[in-house]
């Protein structure tokens, strides 16, 4: 059956979590709802008084990697992850180089590819590739190789090993 929720901030992504919850990436934070009833269980928002919570409230993307680690990206909060063994959310701060793809804290898409790398699409700078150790392995800045840029709104991989990045300008 289709559950219709009350109007609220835009829903940018949905993630079915193990158990009885569905997580919504929303413009005002990360909303956790009960699957059966649709009732809101929690709303996690950025708060200076709670540094262990989300680094930004405008959550744009979420994913679970193969090991069960939860990743999310937000405008102003950048790349964040949460493991089941801690209550806090880890934030990958901006790169020291101002011109780096991750030199800004605006993450729009996240995907894990089969070799374990995490590909992170940004609002305007390009795509960053992180290794399983979370170190920056590669940067694919917009404006090279015919990629004119725009927002990296979606990242996926196919069975042939290709990684697809969708932007406002091209794929």
Image (cartoon, grey):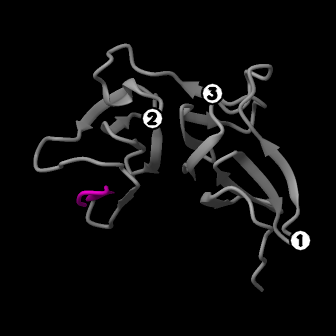
Disc 1 element: loop
| Label at residue 168 | none
Which residue is identified by label 2? 132
Residue at (74% x, 37% y) in the render: 45
167 in magenta: yes
Up-down: is 98 above or below 141?
Answer: above
Disc 3 element: strand
* SS majority, magenta: loop
Q: Quadrant of residue 84?
A: top right
Measure the C-alpha gap from mark 3 to mark 2: 15 Å
| Label at residue 37 | 1
**Which numbered disc, 1 or 3, marks the residue closer to the eye?**
1
Residue at (27% x, 33% y) in the render: 139
Measure the C-alpha gap from mark 1 to mark 3: 30 Å
Locate residue 109 relative to residue 151 in the image: left or right: right
Locate residue 52 relative to residue 10 in the image: left or right: right
Q: Quadrant of residue 48?
A: top right
Say which label, 2 or 1, has the lower sequence index.
1
Residue at (77% x, 76% y) in the render: 4
């Amino acid at each position: 059956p289709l559950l219709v929720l009350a109007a609220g901030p835009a829903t940018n992504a949905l993630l079915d979590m193990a158990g009885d919850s569905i997580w919504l990436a929303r413009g005002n934070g990360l909303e956790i709802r009960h699957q059966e009833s649709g009732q809101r269980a929690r709303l996690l928002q950025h708060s200076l008084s709670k540094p262990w919570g989300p680094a930004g409230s405008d959550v744009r993307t979420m994913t679970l990697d193969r090991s069960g680690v939860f990743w999310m990206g937000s405008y102003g909060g950048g790349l964040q992850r949460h493991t089941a063994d801690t209550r806090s959310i880890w934030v990958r701060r901006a790169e020291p180089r101002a011109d780096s793809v991750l030199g800004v804290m605006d993450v729009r898409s996240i995907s894990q590819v089969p070799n374990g790398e995490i590909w992170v699409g940004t609002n305007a700078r390009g795509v960053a590739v992180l290794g399983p150790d979370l170190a920056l392995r590669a940067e694919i800045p917009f404006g090279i190789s015919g990629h004119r840029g725009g927002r990296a709104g979606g990242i996926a991989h196919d069975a042939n090993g290709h990684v697809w990045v969708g932007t406002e300008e091209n794929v």
